Structure formats: C-alpha cells, structure tokens
Amino acid sequence: MVSFVGRLSEIRELRENVQQHKIVVIHGFKGVGKSSIARELCRQIQQPYYWNDLRNINTADGVLQHLLSNFTQEAAVLEDKRALLTIVCENIASQGCDLVVIFDNAEDVIKGEDSAFFVEIILSLSHLINTNILVTTNVMLPFHPDKICDFILRELCFKDSYDLLKSVCPTLKDADKICAIVNLCEGIPLALVLAGGEIGFLDVDEVIYLLSHHRLKVLSSDCYSKDEQLEPVYKGFLDRLPTVLEDKLAVLNYIPGTFNKEEAISVLGVTEEGSEESMQIFADRHLIATVSEERYNIHGILRDCLNEYFKIKDIKGVRARFCRTFAVILKQIEKKTETKDYAEALSRVSVEYQNFRKLFTDVIHCTEDTYHVFIDLAATSFTGESILFTTMANYDMGIHFYEVCLRKAVEYKEELDEAKVLTGYGKVLTNIKGDYVRAEERFQRAMDIRRRYSKKRDYFMALLCQSYGWNLGCQGKFVQASRTH
C-alpha cells in the first residue's frame, strides 16, 4: 500500500474545518483521493474513528445497519428508521470518548430516494457531544444545512504528483520523464500509482508512449482489482448517470478545450433553462471542473472514457452548432483586435486556442449547414490565419483547411466563394509562408473569376486587389501592382 504523500495545505485546512464544524463533507472527482485524505486526517487527529464504506449502499436502512454493526456488533430488525437511528445514537453517545464517524463513498445513498434521510442521519449524529462526522462523495448533498462544511478536493498539484510518483518508483531518476508521466496522469493519485507500478515491467519510454496513446488501457491492467483499475472505475461512474445526462456530457465533450457557460449552452443546443440545469448537475457531480472564474473543463481521463464508450447521437447537428458557436466567437475577437481591447482579445485567443483548432480541422466534415461558416473564415479571418500557422508544424493543417474550402466551393458551384477562398489562401502564402509565386497564382485565379462578375463591386473585390497588389509589390513588380488598384 502506498503511503500518503503531499496534500499538506489540504490536510491543514481539513483539520481546521473539523475543529470548527461537526460535519465536514469532502467532495471531489472520482479517484482524486477523497478516501485517502480522510484516512490520513483520522490518523493525524488521533481520535477513535469508525469507517463506514457506503459503496453500492443506496438506502437509509443500509446505512443504519452499517452503523449498528460498527457500534453494537449486531443487526436490528425494525421497520421504523428513526427508532433504528435512536439506537445508533444511544450506542455512540455511550462510547465515553470523542470519536469520528466516516461515511465513505456516500454518493449512491445521496443520489437515492433516501438522500433526505441520510442528511437527517448525519445531522442527528452531529448533535452528539462526542461525535464529528466526515463524509466523502463525488456528488453534492440534495440540500445544505448551515452546519455542514463543504471541502472541495482538487487534483494533486504538480509537486505532490511528482513526489507521489517518486515514492512509488524511487529508482526513476530522469526528471524529464518523471514530468512527462506526471502531466499525463493529470493529478489523479490512482493514475500515478498505477503508472509507477508499470515501470519495471515496461521501459519508462514505453510507459510514456502507452499513456500518451492508450491511457485507459495501460492504467487498467488485469494485475489490479476492478476497484483499482482506471477504466472500470470511471466507466462505472459514468454508467450511473441517467441516459439524458450521458448524452449531454458526450455532446459537451465535443468541445476539446475549456469552455464557459454560454459556449456550453450553445453547443448543447437545448433551451437555456435546460442547459443551465444540466451544467449545474455536471458541476455538482464533479463531471466538469471550474478552471477559472468563468471557465470549465472535463478532466482528461474522463474525456478518454467518454470518447471510448459514449457516442454522440446527432453528431452532424453537434458539429454544426460547435462550428457556428466558435466561428462567431472568433469574429468577435477579431473586432476587438482593432480596438483598445487588443490585449484582451489576444488573451481570449490563447484561452480558446484548442477550440479554434478544432473549428478549423472540422472543415473535413463541412456540409451545407456549415459551408458558409468555413467560407467566411477562409475569406476574412485574420486571427484564424495566426491560429492555423503559429508554427511550421501547423502549416500543413492550415493549407489543408484552404484546400478543402476550395473543393467545397467548386463542389457547390459557387464561383464567388471560390474567389474569396483563393484570396485568403493567397494572403497566407504571401504573409506567412513568403511563397510569393504560389500566392500570385491563387490571386490571379481569383481575379479571373472576379472579371466574370465585373459589375459586382464589394468588400471582397477590394480585399483581393489590395492583397494581390501587396504580393506583387513584395516581388518588386511595382507597375503590375499599381494596376490591381
């Protein structure tokens, strides 16, 4: 068994909470270490404690029988739940010492029909002078009396993750490889312990590769019990969701990066009231985590499980909503780049970077519903160009975006759209790649199309003339450049 590592600030805060409150409820993501920190807390405060593992117990009677077995070593058969509770309280009060009663893995009873009575149980126990209550759960209580203190347990910080992995695998010395494994385990103690356990059976580089490409599988080895395998733990967690919430979470998972509430509601595509309610349920069950004041995310390992087991039913509709949502956001950001809010706009681009990348790569799924979204991006999105071509590694992806847009314009027989895309394509080749010759060829094709519509004078014609002239000027063809205006 791995000894407890880190969490110094969390333990300190929990100890203060236990001193100030009779009931403390530890909330957190599945596998984040709620049970471990509860055990460590009990070890440190050095009071007798009574551990009640409520996993798979979803009735008040089951909870009471657990308590009875702890304090009377026998079961009692009474139809009146409150009579049973009275017996439990009398036995605890007679212990003659201060003690802690722990209800571990309480989520099943909290989600069950007896959730209100479970709250009554812990409130009744808290009235005993000698008793403190500690609850661990991955869901919020249905209602929240003032005397209950909530403690949200987050993922391990980088330093604690690093130290935990080193404690599991002390022979591991390469700091870069330790950091790679730590980052891939995303602060989940169980994942770090399992990954460390594989080192020795596998080379460190093999472990890193497998975590990068098959994380769920490598952390679900048959060498471990089902409760210690990541895949069954998280799949079981998701399987307990109502089907309607499973479907909505799968849709939300289509957003690859962090998201705010408005973005989530838009991609979910249901009424704002219904989406607000779903978002609150996801937050209460720790299916989404708050990463900043207004932004949320789905944990990477939970995303792995969603991708593996939960398919989006209306994938075409979800893609269309995603593309329209983030294309509008990109346009809003572009408007800000021309104002005093320039720095704020650049910051938002950084925050939305993963989502914008997916927006551009989703061009391969372009349909009539999203055709004009992509054509507009290819023709006018200056911020989009910087996202697509930030590094040479992204360059091929960016070129592919313009090529697909061109094919779609030809497929839909929209010549003016073809000219728009060719203009955007030429700008990229000129300003980012510096390939003036290839860019000139695209501008010339766009100009040939526009000449067939000589009476149509609009913004896109002006943009073509300006961009074509700039390209020719960069090549020293100043006379030709002047003729494009």
Image: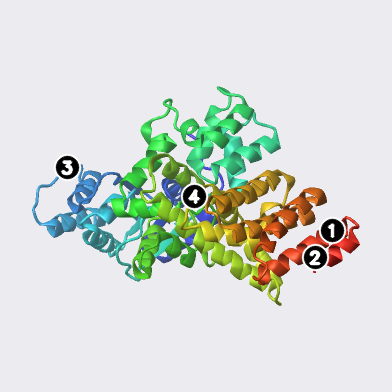
The disc at residue 74 is: 3
Reading the chain from its start, which is encountered first: label 1 or label 2? Answer: 1
- How far across and down, in percent of the image, does residue 324 sit? 50, 62
* Secondary structure state at the residue bearing disc 3: loop
Q: Residue at x 80, y 65 (%)?
A: 484
First along the sequence among labels 4 and 3: 3
Q: In the depicted view, which residue is nearer to us: 85 or 384? A: 384
Mark 1 and mark 2 in contact? Answer it, CB < 8 Å.
yes
Q: Amino acid at mark 2?
A: Thr
Q: Mark 1 sits on what residue?
A: 472
Front position in the image: 482 or 437: 482
Q: Residues within 10 Å of mark 4 (few under 14, many from 20)?
A: some
Real-space Cα separation, disc 1 to disc 2, in angstroms:
9 Å
Amino acid on which the number 4 mark rests in the picture: His
Residue pictured at 39% horizontal, 58% vertical: 282
Q: Residue at x 18, y 57 (%)?
A: 85
Q: Quadrant of residue 131?
A: bottom left
